[in-house]
Image: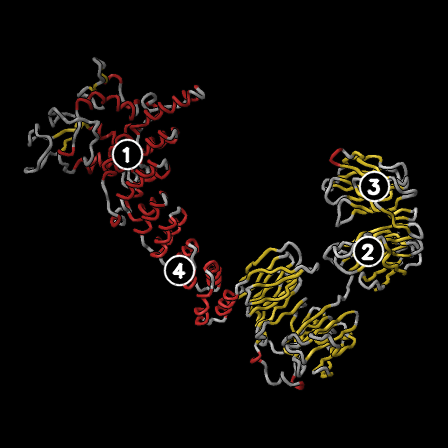
């Protein structure tokens, strides 16, 4: 957006509207510039000045001058483009002429001569009148027909020069201002001077207005003003084809509809009918007069004044910020409502009324049976009426421009040029209009609603009577009548009926009526009908519907259906949830397989983890390239795989940073950094048997205490008790004398028990080196310092108990090979006397005669 400015320096300056940046400037004329006109469709501007020249500028061509129009002999005061023909423009000059030009021609089409110099010119905005209005020195305002080139009317109201004159864009008004400081309003139809305003701000230089707005702006020597123009426009009302009334300009005349003979007349600012032509009301100032059979019947003077009248079943009187309904016969207050409506519409049965305000409209239900007898008489009239006489049903945030009732359906047009109708709280759009239009009526035989515009064009839109009757019956909860009307509803309107039934809360009936599969599926889901929803999902066969049905099935505990739906929807996460929740191992295995085939790595990992397949979980991490996570996983669950994973990690890291790769340690190369690595290996072997055991879900409460146990502690306890022997210790193959110092005797099997050590004699005891037991005890105390039972006591108690020999499976030769090495790693070397060490041979052995 651009802003164009000019002043007496003959420059036109261009500014950016959003940033206010000075974009460009150029010299337009040799003398003072008088006016700038922007073309509505082309990238042109027209300028005129005191040099008598009109210039055309093109902003797409870097504001170059495209054409000059030289026909005036003196100052050109104003240039205006014809809104009905964008190739035509008019200019007003002090040479006493108004010239009409074509943009493509340098010479004018014709000239309109005046008696005096012309200061301003304006085109009529409507298509019905090819008029120009001009203002000249001396105070005259002239109306011209530029087709016949004749002066239609001369308006005399100013005492000095007229500087500005415009047609109002929506009201039948001509506005003019001049050097006398007066702002004059003229009726564009009758050319009568409606009002003269003078605010003492000296000369009037500019008047502007907006379309569809009653606000005008005026610029004076001493400032600017914004004014709201109120004009009572003549209207015609028909009732029962008997009478027509014309009201406007302070008068009303009632005619017979057929012969247009005058029936009655009088002075009034507003006129409204009752429900029949025998009664009507008029307002004059703050007095309302009711006529019955064309004779004065009642007179009403509201305390809050009268700003508007509304007819219908009740007489509505609008005051400041309020509306009061009165009975026609007794003129009693029925209800005082704190609302200032623009329109009031009653339905045919007089049970519903629409109050249309500025930003919304309200639907009220009228309850005449709730009126007390005291209210129906003048003596018992209360100030606010009966609060139960009206019940608010709905409020719709839309601005109604015009409306009518068809049964219990309110059809209306809004300020957004949309044709819509309301029924039962639901609003349905019938059509989008390209211009403001007004409702003329509805013909049920044709199933059409008719509208017209200001140019007298009439259009119609289809609005099925059967649909409206069905919706009306549903609102009244008359389902017998609705069932009778339903066969008459066209098939292409069944979905509209179904949506309306759903909005009213009748979802079961909507499911039976609808013929849209998606809508029927949604309704079956809302109703919880899984069988119907399943059949509809099979017909649609979309992922979203299977997932939605699976959710409902799980809520209703139909896990078999939920499992089938999730599998068809390929929702592996949902299947994982069902498998883990139900403890279905077979389903979990299937989920793992399906997730692997569909590259769902996260689901595959969780499924294998739930199954206790730590090896498979590790391979998933490796194959996914998550080597750091794989190394941490191996360190936690599979210590035997640490070295292999770390090597892979180092190889990958070396491609990025070799120094970083070398900083990663693994147990085989850096045993000193992993002092408990052998214990972790034993723990892995100890837990492997536990992982392979399948425990039912019912045993969860029995194993709850074991879930918080330390696995290393449990392994050491089992090892000390003989319940577990690591496969790192091979089977014992030699007999050891039970009196040898440094050994602990483990009792042999009792007679009759089978033993895997068939090569050992039954009466011989199996011996374990005592320092091995001491080492296990030390490690147990180091790893479980918080244990309430000391490891030494545990070892002592264990040594005194009988342990079956079939639980021991190790090789004493290997123990002897690792004996001193183990002691040196886990015990304090200061406890040994070097003199007691025998360093002969490849092994470190303790002398039998010395205490260790």
The C terminus is located in which quarter? top left
First along the sequence among labels 3 and 4: 3
Q: Would residue 628 be found to the left or right of residue 8 on screen?
A: left
649, 826: nearer the viewer: 649
Instruction: Measure the C-alpha gap from mark 1 to mark 4.
Output: 62 Å
Label 2: how many Cα within 10 Å (few below 14, some 14–19, many 20+): few
* Tag nearer the camera, 3 or 4: 3
Label 1 or label 4, whichever comes before in sequence order: 4
Pick the front one: 592 or 505:
505
- Quarter where residue 48 is shown: top right
- Say which element carries label 1: helix
> CA gap, disc 3 to disc 4?
70 Å
Badge 2 is on which residue? 225
Q: Secondary structure beneath disc 4?
A: helix
Residue 441 shown left or right of residue 801 in the figure: right
Lower position in the chain sequence, tag 1 or tag 2: 2
The quadrant of the picture occupied by the N terminus is top right
Residue pointed to by mark 1: 780
Mark positioned earlier in the residue sequence (3 or 1):
3
Residue under label 3 = 47
- Please indicate, yes or no, whether residue 303 appears anywhere in the rendered image: no
Q: Position of residue 741 (x, y in %)?
A: 16, 25
Quarter location, residue 661: top left
* Mark 1 surroundings within 10 Å by alpha-carbon count, few (fewer than 14), some (14 through 19), many (20 or more): many
Foreground disc of the pair 1, 4: 4
- Expressed as whole percent of the image width and height from the top left, the position of residue 242 reads 67, 76
- Horizontally, residue 11 falls left or right of residue 737, namely right
Give the image location of residue 368, x and y in percent: 58, 79
Say how many tags the image has.
Answer: 4
Q: Which residue has dot 4 on it?
A: 527
């Amino acid at each position: 957006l651009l802003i164009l400015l000019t002043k007496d320096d003959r420059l036109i300056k261009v500014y950016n509207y959003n940033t206010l940046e000075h974009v460009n400037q150029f010299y337009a004329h040799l003398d003072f510039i008088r006016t700038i006109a922007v073309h509505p469709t082309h990238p042109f501007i027209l300028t005129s000045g005191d040099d008598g020249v009109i210039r055309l500028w093109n902003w797409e061509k870097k504001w170059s001058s495209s054409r000059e129009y030289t026909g005036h002999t003196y100052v050109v005061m104003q240039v205006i483009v014809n809104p009905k023909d964008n190739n035509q423009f008019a200019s007003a000059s002090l040479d006493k002429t108004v010239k009409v030009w074509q943009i493509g021609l340098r010479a004018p089409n014709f000239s309109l001569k005046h008696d005096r110099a012309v200061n301003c010119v304006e085109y009529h905005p409507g298509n019905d009148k090819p008029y120009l209005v001009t203002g000249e020195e001396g105070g005259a305002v002239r109306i011209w027909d530029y087709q016949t080139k004749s002066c239609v009317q001369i308006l005399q109201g100013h005492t000095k020069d007229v500087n500005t004159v415009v047609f109002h864009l929506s009201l039948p008004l001509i506005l003019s201002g001049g050097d006398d400081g007066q702002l004059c309003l003229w009726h564009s139809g009758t050319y009568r001077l409606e009002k003269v305003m003078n605010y003492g701000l000296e000369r009037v230089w500019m008047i502007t207005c907006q379309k569809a707005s009653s606000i005008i702006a005026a610029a004076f020597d001493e400032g600017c003003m914004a004014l709201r123009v109120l004009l009572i426009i003549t209207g015609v009302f028909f009732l029962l084809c008997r009478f027509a009334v014309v009201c406007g300009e302070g008068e009303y005349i009632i005619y017979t509809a057929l012969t247009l003979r005058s029936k009655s007349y009088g002075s009034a600012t507003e006129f409204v009918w009752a429900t029949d032509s025998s009664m009507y009301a008029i307002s004059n100032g703050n007095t309302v007069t009711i006529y019955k059979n064309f004779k004065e019947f009642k007179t009403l003077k509201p305390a809050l004044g009268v700003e508007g009248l509304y007819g219908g079943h009740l007489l509505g009187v609008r005051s400041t910020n309020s509306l009061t309904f009165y009975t026609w016969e007794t003129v009693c207050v029925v209800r005082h409502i704190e609302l200032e409506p623009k329109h009031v519409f009653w339905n045919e049965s007089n049970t519903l009324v629409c109050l249309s305000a500025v930003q919304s409209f309200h639907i009220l239900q009228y309850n005449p049976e709730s009126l007390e007898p005291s209210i129906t008489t003048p003596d018992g009239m209360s100030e606010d009426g009966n609060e139960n006489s009206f019940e608010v049903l709905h409020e719709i945030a839309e601005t109604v421009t015009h409306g009518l009732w068809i049964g219990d359906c309110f059809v209306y047009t809004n300020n957004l040029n949309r044709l819509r109708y309301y029924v039962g709280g639901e609003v349905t759009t019938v059509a989008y209009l390209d211009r403001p239009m007004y409702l003329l009526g509805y013909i049920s035989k044709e199933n059409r609603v008719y509208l017209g515009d200001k140019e007298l064009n009439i259009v119609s839109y289809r609005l099925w009577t059967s649909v409206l009757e069905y919706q009306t019956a549903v609102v009244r909860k008359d389902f017998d009548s609705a069932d009778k009307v339903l066969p008459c509803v066209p098939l292409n309107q069944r979905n509209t009926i179904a949506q309306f039934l759903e909005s009213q809360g009748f979802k079961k009936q909507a499911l039976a009526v609808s013929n849209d599969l998606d809508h029927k599926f949604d309704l079956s889901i809302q109703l919880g009908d899984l069988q119907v929803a399943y059949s509809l999902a099979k017909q649609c066969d979309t992922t979203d519907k299977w997932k939605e049905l699976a959710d409902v099935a799980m809520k209703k505990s139909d896990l078999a259906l939920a499992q089938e739906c999730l599998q068809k929807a390929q929702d592996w996460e949902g299947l994982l949830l069902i498998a883990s929740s139900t403890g279905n191992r077979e389903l979990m295995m299937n989920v793992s397989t399906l997730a692997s085939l569909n590259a769902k790595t996260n689901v595959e990992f969780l499924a294998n983890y739930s199954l206790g397949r730590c090896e498979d979980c590790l391979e998933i991490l490796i194959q996914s390239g998550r080597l750091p996570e794989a190394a941490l996983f191996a360190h936690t669950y599979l210590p035997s795989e640490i070295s292999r994973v770390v090597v892979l990690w180092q190889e990958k890291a070396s491609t990025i940073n070799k120094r970083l790769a070398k900083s990663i340690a693994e147990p085989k190369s850096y045993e000193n950094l992993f002092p408990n690595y052998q214990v972790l290996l034993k723990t892995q072997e100890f837990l492997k048997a536990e992982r392979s055991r399948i425990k039912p879900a019912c045993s969860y409460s029995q194993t709850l205490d074991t879930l918080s146990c330390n696995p290393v502690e449990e392994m050491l306890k089992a090892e000390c008790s003989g319940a577990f022997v690591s496969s790192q210790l091979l089977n014992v193959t030699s007999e050891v004398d039970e009196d040898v110092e440094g050994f602990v005797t483990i009792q042999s099997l009792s007679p009759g028990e089978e033993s895997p050590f068939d090569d050992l004699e039954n009466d011989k005891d199996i011996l374990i080196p005592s320092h091995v037991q001491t080492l296990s005890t030390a490690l147990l105390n180091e790893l479980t310092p918080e244990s309430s039972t000391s490891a030494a006591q545990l070892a002592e108690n264990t040594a005194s108990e009988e342990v079956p020999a079939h639980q021991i499976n190790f090789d004493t030769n290997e123990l002897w090979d690792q004996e001193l090495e183990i002691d040196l790693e886990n015990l304090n070397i200061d406890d040994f006397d070097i003199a007691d060490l025998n360093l002969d041979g490849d092994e470190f052995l303790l002398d039998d005669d010395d205490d260790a």
